[in-house]
Structure formats: C-alpha cells, structure tokens
Amino acid sequence: MAAPLAIGPLDDTAQDGVRALAAAAQAADGVAPVSEQPLLRLGADEPWLTHAVAHSKHGTVIGYVQVDRGGQDASAELVVHPEHRRQGVGRLLLRTAERDARLPQYSGTPGQRGKALRVWAHGDTAAAQGFAAAAGYVVVRELLFLARPLTADDAGARPALPDGYRVRTFVPGDDDEAWVALNARAFASHPEQGRLTAADLRDRQGEPWFDAAGFFLLEAPDGSLAGSLWTKVEPGQPAGGRDGEVYAVGIDPDHQSRGLGQALTAVGLAHLATVADRAVLYVDGDNTAAVRTYERAGFERAAVDVQYAQA
C-alpha cells in the first residue's frame, strides 16, 4: 500500500519531522541525505518550490522530497527512512518529483513546458546507485568532496596579493548587498551558488556556524569587491577531528587570472588552521581548473555527491 502523501508548505511539526528523518538516514548511511539549502528552505513557500512528505499509517514522517524549479533544470533532493525502504516510498516520491518538474514554474504563464529533472544522491551510496538504475537514471554531474590536513605552516601563511588589493573581513548588514552582487557575477554559470539572494545570506548568518571572522572579502584598488572566501566550521565537533570548510570562494570575472583565487584560498586555510584540524571543500568534477588548483594546495578526493537524470 502506498504511503499517504502530503504536498504543500510545511508547518513547524512537519519541518521537525523532516529534520528527524534526515538525522535517522544520516545515522544509518554515514552521510547527510539532504544538503544545507533544502534544509534552510523547509519553511519556504515559493511558487517554484514543492515539498512532498510521505507518512506511515501512524502519521510519522518516513519520506520527503523537495523540488526546486527555479534553475535551468528542476533539482530534487529525496530521503526515505531506513526502516521504510524497499516499500515503494522512494519510487512514490520520485514519481511525484517527475510530475512536479513538468509543471510550469508559475501557474498560468503561457509558453512553459516544464523542466528536466535532476536528483541528488549525497555520497552516491550503493543503495542510491541501485535505486537510480532501477528508475532508469544515470549520473550527469559529480560534486567532489576534497580534504586535506591543516598544519602549522597553513596558520603562518601570508599570501602575497597584487598591488592595491587587500583582504578584510565581512561586515554583516553593511556588506550584504555588495556580496550578493559579487557572488552572482562570480558564479553566473553555477546552478545553485549563483542564485543566492540577500535572504539566503541572512538565513546563513542566523546559523550557529556563522562567523564573520572567517568570511573574507577581497577589495580591488578602487575599493570595489573583487572576490570573497567564506569558511564554515560546524559547532560540536570532537577535539582533534574538526573539519573546517572552504565554503565558497569566488572571484569577479573582471579580476580573474591574477592568482587571486589561490591567494584567497591560502587566507582561508590560515584561518581554518586556528580553529579546525582538516580543511574540506566541494567542487564540481568538471571544473578542471579549480580541481587542479585545490590539488596543488594538497587536497585529495574524499567522497562524491552526484546528480542523476533520466537516461
């Protein structure tokens, strides 16, 4: 029997149920099943965003899918409770996402034909691979998770910048709009990062990991923003095993090819070396230039997230 399915905005109780579901899946699989952005959007009610929750006969949340139709392709993140897998819940959620992706982004707008659907699999586990293969999905994108130890040499690094450029820390409230504009330029072709809004930025400023001291802005000689690097250290990690993430590093296209990205990365690693034991980051597998830059900085592949689409 198919699980009861609720489609629409999530109230506080449903949001808590989804978070508990995600925690149960992470405990079983060793990897977070849903990324940061969908979790931040659990309370969002937007015309381009769909929430679908599967419940057990007792009303417990046992499955969830979020579909984002705001980009060039529709993107979905899906999770099923470990105790309710292989019971058709995942297939029900995937069919729901497929139907949703075919809807117009805004109801009543003519000339819209829906979008192709891509589905994330974090960690690309064997279970995810089998589920995707059975549904006729193949890998269309890889997001590499790279890592490297942090050392005393990192903490003492003082990277050189071209004449006139300087690095300072982000000032919440004062720098919000300028950073959003910079980020949009730096990630114009990126399907997720380039779409961040001032509201998305403020959501992250409200997270317990946010620390402006680890958020660096690169100013050009004329005082405009030329680049930024944002670090992230989740609280509550065990001593000796703390990961510090190079969360986002971007350079304005007008200031690229000057070694600024490499210099900013060194600034970020110097900061992380004072608060963490290992540096980690995500980078698209087909971004050859960035992958090579990080490999030269000592990063190695530790895991991979993938996006699947119908063959």
Image: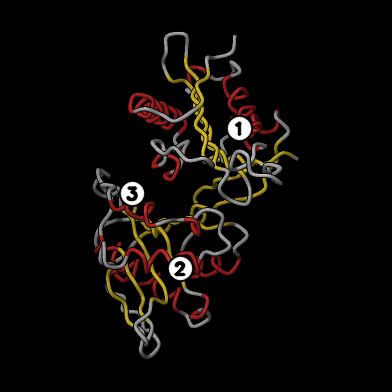
Quarter that holds the N terminus: top right
Q: Secondary structure at mark 1?
A: helix
Dot placed on the residue nearer the N-terminal end, 2 or 3: 3
- Is 92 placed above or below 100 here? above
- The answer to which image quadrant residue 16 occupies is top left
- Residue matched to label 1: 97
Q: Nearer the viewer, mark 2 or mark 1?
A: 1
Q: Secondary structure at mark 3?
A: helix
- Is 102 placed above or below 260 here? above
Quarter that holds the C terminus: top right
Image coords of residue 118 (percent x, y):
63, 42
Dot placed on the residue nearer the N-terminal end, 1 or 3: 1
* Amino acid tagged 2: Gly
How far apart are labels 2 and 1 at the CA level?
32 Å
Image coords of residue 220 (percent x, y):
38, 83
Q: Which mark is residue 203?
A: 3
Instruction: Report the residue at 42% width, 9% height from top.
Output: 58
Q: Which mark is residue 275?
A: none
- Is 134 placed above or below 114 here? above
- Residue matched to label 2: 250
The reply to whether discs 2 and 1 touch (Cβ–Cβ < 8 Å) is no
* Amino acid tagged 3: Asp
Q: As rendered, which of 233 and 250 lies closer to the eye? A: 250
Q: Nearer the viewer, mark 2 or mark 3?
A: 3
Crowding at mark 2 (Cα within 10 Å: few <14, some 14-19, many 20+): many
Q: Is residue 235 left or right of residue 160?
A: left
